[in-house]
Amino acid sequence: MFVGHAFLAFGVVALLAGRFGSGERPLRLPGGVTVSSTIAVGLAAGLFASLPDVDVIHAAFQVVTLPDGATAFDHFWAATSERHRTTTHSLVVAVGASAGFALWTVRRWLGLCVLAGVVALGVLTGGMVSGAVMTIFALAGLLVVTLAVRTGLAGQSIFGAAAVGLIIHPFTDLLTGEPPGFFAPWDVGLLESRVEPFADPTLNLLLAFVTELAVIWFGLLAGLWLADVDWRRHVHPAAALGIAYAPMALILHQPSVDNAVPFVATILPIGVVGAIGWRRPLISDAAVSIVLTALSTITIAWLGFGLAYVTLVI
């Protein structure tokens, strides 16, 4: 997944906070925007859920030394296989880092000690380079904590948001790549390879893509529900134009999870139809119309492609 981690964590935490929290109270985000406490803790969870992918920074530095005949894109993804989805994706780290982030809000020295232990796990796993990646992970997490504290969230809420976000992340990677190191630094594997229920590689790609769409929808609808906004009033009828993407099933040569660029690069621009929501908004909030219409268009495009592929190609 690319952004699905954050949307899933936001939706889960925001809904749980709305159901079991101590009640709605207004909190002020940096910049002066006021939101409810349920939305604020959900946003924190979404940011924490994105933290594990900071490990790709290791590969970004390696792109400056390209081997002969390699493109920057190919080399970047080859380099990520060395460090990506290891310690930062560990459930052990998720629990330890969440405790460190929460403790930092009340006893900074204690929180830093716990986070130093998390960095030490990285050193044990992959030496000083892995330790450097984990240091960036910890610093990025403390930035999220700082923003959460400025918003008005307490340490208990920050621990819950961090724990849910960091624990969700590795499980949402199971459809798109090698299984993460769930128990790093210990080499205990839950799965030997990514989840691929279909023999046809394109169907596995369609499953991974619709899973990403589903969790994005889940997060958005959860937020709109908590904000008492009717999402149906924001989807422009032009979203139905997404069905025009269906013939691409006959053009693209068996895209797969390992060769997803042609599919992703052609289906995502279909969402530009969402701009109609800005030019001719159904109601006053054009930004929401743009996002929901764009997402609806891409979803319909996926459906059209899938139906064409199943009926005409397989």
Image (spheres, helix red, strand yellow):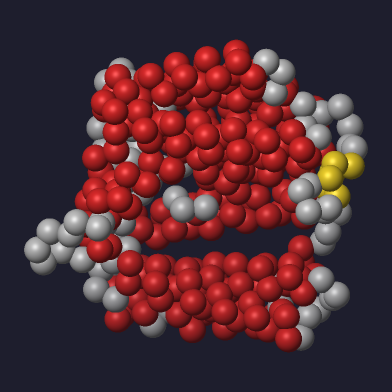
Give the left or right position of residue 182, taking residue 51 as reference.
left
x 60%, y 13%: residue? 110
Q: Residue at x 74, y 67 (%)?
A: 288
Between 106 and 235, the one lying in front of the other is: 106
Residue at x-position 33% and y-position 67% = 261
Q: What residue occupies the far front of the structure in this picture?
A: 109
| In the image, residue 176 above or below residue 72 | above
Say how many tags the image has. Answer: 0
Q: Position of residue 13 (x, y in %)?
A: 68, 36
Q: Is residue 199 above or below residue 303?
A: above
Q: Nearer the viewer, residue 74 or 179?
A: 74
Q: Does residue 196 sit above or below 309 in this rendering?
A: above
Residue found at the very far bottom of the displayed protein: 279
In-image side of 78 versus 298 (left or right) = left
Determine the residue positioned at 52% across, 16% down: 114
Q: x, y percentage for residue 147?
A: 70, 40
Give whichever of 23, 156 is nearer the camera.
156
- Work out which residue is located at the far left of the displayed protein and give it: 68
Front-most of residues 143 and 220: 143
Q: Position of residue 187 (x, y in %)?
A: 27, 21
Confirm whether residue 129 shows in the render.
yes
Residue 49 is situated, as x and y percent measured from the top left of the image, at 55, 39
Q: In this rendering, is residue 165 above or below 28? A: above
Quadrant where the image shows the C terminus? bottom left
State whether residue 190 appears in this view: no
